Image (cartoon, rainbow, N blue to C red):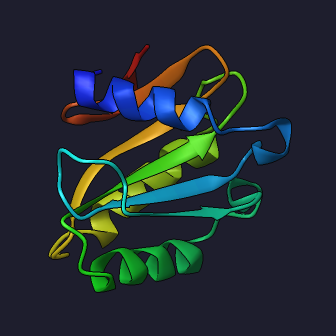
């Protein structure tokens, strides 16, 4: 994981609670190297993830005019579930042609975090 993403993971980790399990957070950045300007969390989204919800998230991400966004799934163990991997695959397809730059996708836990490896949506990096 690159240093920027590790910093974002630590910021997210400092804010998560037990109630955040399976939540999907989207952080929007007005400056790619700055702090998030806006953050959105959908409680339990990954328990009922479907393609329509992902389409709506992409519409929001593309419509807010942010420079970039980061998607974070909260899993207390920090390891992706099959639904998380599928969501990442689907997001990659849905985001083609979007004007907002996707800065990453990460699964954040209490002590571990996972992000997809470059060019490989199933194998990732743990920090």
Q: What residue is rendered at 45% in x and 79% in y?
A: 55
Residue 61, quarter of picture: bottom left
Which part of the image, by quadrant, shows the N terminus? Answer: top left
Residue 119 in the figure: left or right of residue 14: left
- Number of numbered discs on residues: 0
Q: Which is more toward the observer, 57 or 121?
A: 57
Q: Is residue 124 above or below residue 28?
A: above
User: In the drawing, does residue 76 fall left or right of residue 84?
Assistant: right
Looking at the image, residue 26 sits to the left or right of residue 2; the answer is right
Residue at 69% x, 52% y: name it.
Answer: 23
Q: Is residue 66 left or right of residue 55?
A: left
- In this view, the residue farthest toward the right is 19
Please provide percent x and percent y for residue 38: 44, 65
Position of residue 11 measured from the top left corner of the image (x, y, whole percent): 49, 34
Comparing 121 with 54, the one in front is: 54
Seen at 59% across and 30% down, the residue is 13
Task: Give the residue drawn at x 50%, y 71%.
Answer: 54
The answer to whether any part of residue 2 appears in the image is no
Instruction: Tell me if residue 124 comes above or below residue 80 in the rendering.
Output: above
Q: Position of residue 45 (x, y in %)?
A: 70, 61
Q: Quadrant of residue 40?
A: bottom right
Q: Is residue 1 visible?
A: yes
Q: Quadrant of the C terminus?
A: top left
Q: Is residue 53 above or below residue 123?
A: below
Q: Dividing the picture into quarters, in which one does residue 60 lie?
A: bottom left
């Amino acid at each position: 994981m690159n240093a920027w993403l590790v910093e974002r993971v630590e910021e997210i980790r400092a804010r998560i609670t037990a109630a955040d399990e399976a939540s999907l957070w989207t952080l929007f950045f007005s400056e790619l190297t700055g702090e998030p300007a806006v953050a959105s969390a959908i409680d339990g989204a990954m328990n009922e993830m479907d393609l329509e919800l992902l389409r709506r998230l992409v519409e929001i991400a593309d419509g807010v005019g942010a420079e970039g966004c980061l998607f974070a799934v909260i899993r207390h163990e920090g390891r992706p579930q099959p639904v998380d991997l599928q969501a990442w695959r689907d997001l990659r397809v849905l985001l083609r042609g979007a004007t907002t730059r996707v800065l990453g996708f990460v699964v954040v836990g209490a002590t571990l975090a996972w992000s997809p490896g470059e060019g490989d949506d199933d194998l990732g990096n743990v920090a």
